[in-house]
Structure formats: C-alpha cells, structure tokens
Amino acid sequence: MTRSSWKALYRLLVAGVVLVLAVSAFVFLKGPAFLQRRYYPLRYEHEIAAASERHRVSPYLVAAVIESESGFDASVVSEAGAVGLMQVLPSTAEELERRGLAAPSKGATLSDPAVNIEYGTAYLRYLVERYHEIETAVAAYNAGPGRVDVWAEQGGDIREAIDYPETRHYVVKVVRARERYEELYPDAFPEWRSE
C-alpha cells in the first residue's frame, strides 16, 4: 500500500469511530428510556426523598446534583477534599451544623450516603433561599457563594455572567439532568414533578 492509501484508510477509520460514538451518544441521550436510564441512573431514592422532604428541595434536583457530582459513586473524594455522593466539603458540613441547618449525625461520616445526601440537600436549600433561583444556587454549589455573589451583582442571566467554563457547563448539566430525571422517573417522586 502506498502512503496516501494508508492516510485514506486512517481517515476512514477515524470517521467511522466518530460516527459510532455519535450514534451511541444519541441512543443513550435520546433513544429508548431503558437506555437513557443507564446514562441517568437513580439510586438512594429513599434517602433522597427523605432529605428532600425535610429541606423542601426537589428530589429530582438532588438526583441531578448527585449524578453531576459523583455519578452515584458514594466513595468519591475530590482533590479538594469534597466527599461522597454530593461532594460535600467537611467545612461546609461544619458550617451547616453551626447554622443549625443540619443536625450532626453521631458516629456517621460524610461518606455515608444518607448523611451525605442530608448535608448536600441542606446546603442546596440554603443556596436556594439565598439566591431565590435554582440556576444561581447550582452555580454556587459548584463555584462557591463568594464567587457567585460577584457574578450575581452583574444582573441578568447568571449563565451569561459566569466566567468559569466548568461552572457554566455544570449549571447546564444539572438543569438538563433534572429535566431528564423528571421525564425518566415520573413515579419515583410524583409529588415533585413539574407541571
């Protein structure tokens, strides 16, 4: 084979791989519900429902944050020290306890899914009350309230004010995941479905 034949074969192979990946992504994101559920799993429903009820936060939002933060892997610990399903920092948990927004769990740790969901949901509630809108609260969950305060001062759509690409992507991902969870699991938390 000549050198140009190898290049053509290589280009064809790359195009084939890209096509297969695109079709796979489409099937998982827009295909049959049973395949989409593999991309958007739902676990810990009881813990999510209980914490959501206590803190008056949509369980679909909680599930979307868990999916975005840890992919429902309770053993994840970030380089920054964030722990568990909702990637809660120990300092955030201590602050929630000091403010009386979450009760300390004797003997339990943030790596325990129920405790982690409790603290993460309490923190979401705090952020929703502080910012009065979901997208701004979600941005603060990712980037921290101090940074989001600066962005919020600019007014307008928070997504346009965010200057961290990671946080901008995170907000879109969580909002999209919340919608998908509502569509894919309408009976999981029926009292919370959007109209």
Image (spheres, rainbow, N blue to C red):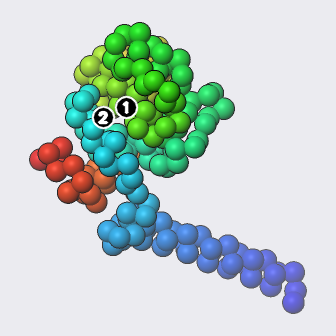
- Would you say residue 138 is visible in this rendering? no
The mark nearer the N terminus, 2 or 1, is 2
Q: Are marks 2 and 1 in contact (CB under 8 Å)?
A: yes
Residue 20: percent from the left, percent from the top?
Answer: 55, 75
112 and 64: which is toward the camera? 112
Disc 2 packing (10 Å; few <14; some 14–19; many ≥20): many
Residue ID for mark 1: 118
Amino acid type at image mark 1: Glu
Residue 166: percent from the left, percent from the top?
Answer: 53, 36
> Residue at position x 47%, y 49% from top?
72
The quadrant of the picture occupied by the N terminus is bottom right
Amino acid type at image mark 2: Ala
Report helix, strand or loop for mark 2.
helix
The label number, if any, that marks residue 18 in the structure image: none
> Residue at position x 20%, y 57% from top?
187
Residue ID for mark 2: 51
